[in-house]
């Protein structure tokens, strides 16, 4: 229900009708949409305003929508209903709620919000629907061939790898209409299986998560009675089924069971559909004439046919045994092109192979795609795993990942051609995976940046965030700031619930949080961490009447069972007061040994003081996930304290 701001009405009935175009992500054919947006300032008061927004869909049916606009006078959204909101600087993005995701032709959806305004409140000059700027008129499902696609005049003719310098490993990539989606592993982070969205395969934005909560039949995922580090979501399958306009995610956990999630929209509404008591390890999902097949396995590669509703197994069969001369093959992706079925498999961590058959059940032939190929990231590994996607223009591309620790595994793109006898061929540059290639011949669309500043203006977290294990949601509030009440009594950060993480942008970036610590209790610890199996943090220690800003390192876990081997030692500290502090970490995650993070703090948000020594990052691969920035708040004595994060920014130099 819309919330009306109490009193202080100032006559302001500003209605602005703007036409907006978007594209459907719910059709495998080329789809187009247009809409009209009515933006109405319903009331204003000193420092704030209320607004309502109505979207009228004038184009093809939509199974999920996101509306974007830019404020021009520093306004911020403080509360929103009938949708979810993220704001980065002036850019606002509102995505559908589960119950209003579907917009038929002629249908409409509405939401409202309260906002803050300190220097005027002009209406937005324009809107985008699903990333496409306004056209104002309905358009046919197949635009005339003379209609030019959106272009970015400043875009170069080439792109540079990695296309995403953030940790997104084990990717599965698909196209739905003109939109590309990329799904990745997250292991013990929640929500899991993040989805990125793109229109040109080069520029990407966060779109959502397939697994809203790690509901995997174990309290260890809640950090309750156990821990699930380096368990959970490994390489998993992601695909779209045109017959029912539904997205599916499928993944095996802990080598013994497979979960299936589904949704009509990538942005939300994901629900657990089934648990299948078979492990489809490193699975790839194919819909072949609407029949679901899964390719999976390590060394022994198998194919399973699932029931039509993807809740049970109909048949399973081994289709390929990897010869000892190759060693291990895994990371299956399954495709059909012409009369052939292909299983795309990796040799970790330095090779890529492909299997081919005229039947999903084999027999399969095998070809090597790459082996020990130099990669595009200086100091990084060989691109491998990932998947193939065909553009709407008929071109093929391979999105792999490149090991680049301590930062993680980075999505890396290269073109694919096909030999005369039907085998995929990777296009290289001077005998290596190209550091750059000509850009795909695809339309450009504006996207929400994957870095920037967040003031937590809405009531939900944006898809750029993931918790360390499942959060205790009773101890979290998002509403004009992120309030973290202590949820765990411990002296071990690795045991503390409600540590909120955000990926580091490479090759280097700086994270800054503005923190209100005035409501901390005796014994509480809060701050900003470089989080991995070897960690360090800068933050506040509250002990009795003493409040100190501290730089602490020496937090470690063993590689055997991921048990805690060190809870940390303070390296430097200083007494602080006033209840507000800015904490900052500058992280160098270029691949290689000896990379460092540096810590600093400020009491005014302007002048920062370095605290403690540089922290040397661990670049071993065994933890799989790369370093992340993490905001934490836990108690060492008793629950009851809280902190409020007013801003969290990640910026590049």
Image: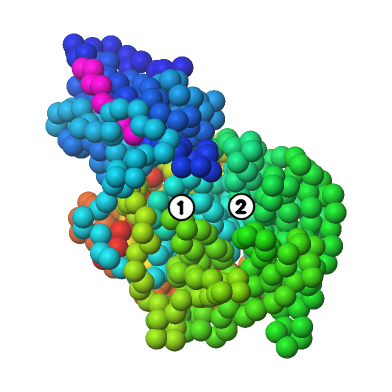
Please give the range of residues in magenta.
Answer: 14-21
As for residue 331 lying within the magenta part, the answer is no
| C-beta proximity under 8 Å, tags 1 and 2 | no
As for residue 18 lying within the magenta part, the answer is yes
- Between residue 126 and residue 106, name the one nearer to us: 106
Q: Residue at x 27, y 19 (%)?
A: 40
Q: Is residue 374 visible?
A: yes
Quadrant, the C terminus: bottom left
Alpha carbons under labels 1 and 2: distance apart:
19 Å
Report crowding for label 2: few under 14, some 14 to 19, many 20 or more residues within 10 A (C-alpha). many
The furthest residue to the left: 119
Indicate the position of residue 631 as horizontal and vertical percent values.
Answer: 45, 53
The colour scheme applied to this rendered structure is rainbow
Q: Quadrant of residue 414?
A: bottom left
**Residue 232 as seen in the image, left or right of residue 112:** right
Label 2 belongs to which residue? 238
**Residue 431 as seen in the image, left or right of residue 73:** right
Q: Residue at x 24, y 33 (%)?
A: 126
Indicate the position of residue 112 as horizontal and vertical percent values.
Answer: 37, 22
For mark 1, give the secondary structure: loop
Indicate the position of residue 337 as horizontal and vertical percent values.
Answer: 61, 60
Q: Which sits earlier in the primary sequence, circle 1 or circle 2?
A: 2
Mark sitting on residue 392: 1
For mark 2, give the secondary structure: strand
Q: Residue at x 25, y 59 (%)?
A: 155
Q: Residue at x 85, y 54 (%)?
A: 315
Q: Is residue 577 visible?
A: no
- Between residue 498 and residue 72, name the one nearer to us: 72
In terms of secondary structure, what is the magenta stretch mainly?
Answer: strand
Q: Which tag is nearer the camera, tag 1 or tag 2?
A: 1
- In the image, residue 367 sits, relative to residue 28, either above or below, namely below
């Amino acid at each position: 229900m819309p919330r009306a701001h109490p009193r202080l009405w100032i006559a302001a009935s500003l209605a602005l009708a703007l036409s907006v175009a978007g594209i459907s992500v719910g059709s495998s054919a080329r789809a187009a949409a247009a809409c009209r947006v009515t933006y109405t300032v319903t009331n204003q008061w000193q420092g704030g305003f209320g607004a309502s927004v109505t979207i009228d869909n004038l184009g093809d049916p939509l199974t999920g929508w996101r509306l974007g606009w830019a404020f021009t006078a520093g306004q911020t959204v403080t509360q929103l209903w009938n949708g979810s909101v993220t704001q980065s600087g002036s850019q606002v993005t509102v995505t559908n709620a589960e119950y209003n995701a579907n917009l038929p032709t002629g249908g409409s959806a509405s939401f409202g919000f309260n906002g803050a305004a300190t220097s005027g409140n002009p209406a937005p000059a324009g809107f985008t629907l699903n990333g496409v700027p306004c056209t104002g008129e309905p358009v046919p499902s197949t635009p005339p061939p003379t209609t030019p696609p959106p272009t970015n005049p400043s875009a170069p003719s080439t792109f540079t790898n990695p296309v995403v310098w953030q940790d997104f490993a084990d990717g599965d990539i698909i196209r739905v209409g003109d939109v590309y989606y990329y799904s990745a592993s997250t292991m013990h982070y929640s929500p899991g299986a993040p989805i990125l969205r793109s229109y040109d395969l080069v520029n990407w934005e966060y779109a959502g998560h397939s697994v809203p909560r790690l509901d995997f039949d174990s309290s260890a995922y809640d950090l309750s009675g156990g821990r699930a580090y380096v368990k959970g979501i490994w390489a998993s399958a992601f695909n779209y089924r045109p017959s029912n306009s539904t997205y599916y995610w499928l993944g095996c956990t802990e080598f013994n069971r497979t979960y299936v999630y589904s949704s009509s929209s990538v942005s939300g509404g994901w629900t657990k559909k089934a648990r299948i008591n078979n492990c489809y390890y490193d699975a790839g999902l194919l819909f072949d004439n609407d029949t679901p097949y899964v390719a999976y396995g390590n060394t022994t590669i198998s194919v399973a046919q699932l029931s039509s509703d993807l809740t049970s197994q109909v048949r399973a069969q081994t289709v390929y045994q990897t010869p000892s001369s190759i060693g291990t093959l895994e990371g299956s992706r399954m495709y059909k092109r012409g009369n052939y079925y292909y299983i795309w498999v990796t040799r970790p961590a330095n090779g890529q192979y492909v299997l081919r058959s005229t039947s999903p059940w084999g027999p399969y032939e095998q070809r090597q795609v790459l082996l020990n190929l130099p990669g595009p990231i200086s100091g990084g590994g060989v691109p491998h795993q990932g998947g193939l996607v065909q553009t709407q223009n008929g071109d093929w591309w391979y999105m792999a990942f490149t090991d680049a620790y301590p930062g993680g595994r980075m999505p890396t793109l290269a073109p694919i051609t096909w030999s005369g006898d039907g085998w995929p061929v990777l296009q290289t540059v001077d005998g290596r995976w190209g550091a750059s290639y000509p850009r795909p011949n695809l339309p450009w669309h504006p996207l929400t940046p994957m870095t920037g500043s967040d003031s937590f203006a809405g009531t939900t977290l944006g898809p750029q965030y993931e918790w360390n294990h499942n959060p205790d949601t009773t101890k979290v509030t998002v509403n004009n700031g992120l309030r973290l009440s202590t949820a765990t009594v411990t002296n071990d950060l690795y045991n503390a619930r409600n540590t909120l993480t955000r990926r580091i942008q490479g090759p280097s970036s700086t994270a800054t949080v503005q923190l209100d610590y005035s409501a901390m209790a005796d014994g509480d610890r809060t701050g900003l961490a470089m989080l991995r199996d070897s960690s360090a943090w800068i933050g506040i220690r509250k002990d009795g009447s003493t409040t100190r800003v501290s730089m602490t390192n020496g937090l470690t876990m063993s590689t055997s069972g991921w048990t805690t081997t060190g809870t940390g030692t303070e390296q430097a500290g200083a007494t602080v007061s006033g209840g507000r502090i800015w904490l900052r970490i500058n992280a160098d995650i270029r691949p290689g040994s000896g990379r460092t993070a540096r810590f600093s703090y400020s009491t005014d948000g302007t002048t920062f003081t370095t605290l403690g020594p540089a922290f040397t990052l661990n670049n071993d691969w065994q933890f799989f996930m790369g370093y992340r920035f993490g905001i934490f708040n836990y108690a060492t004595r008793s629950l009851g304290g809280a902190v409020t994060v007013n801003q969290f920014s990640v910026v590049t130099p």
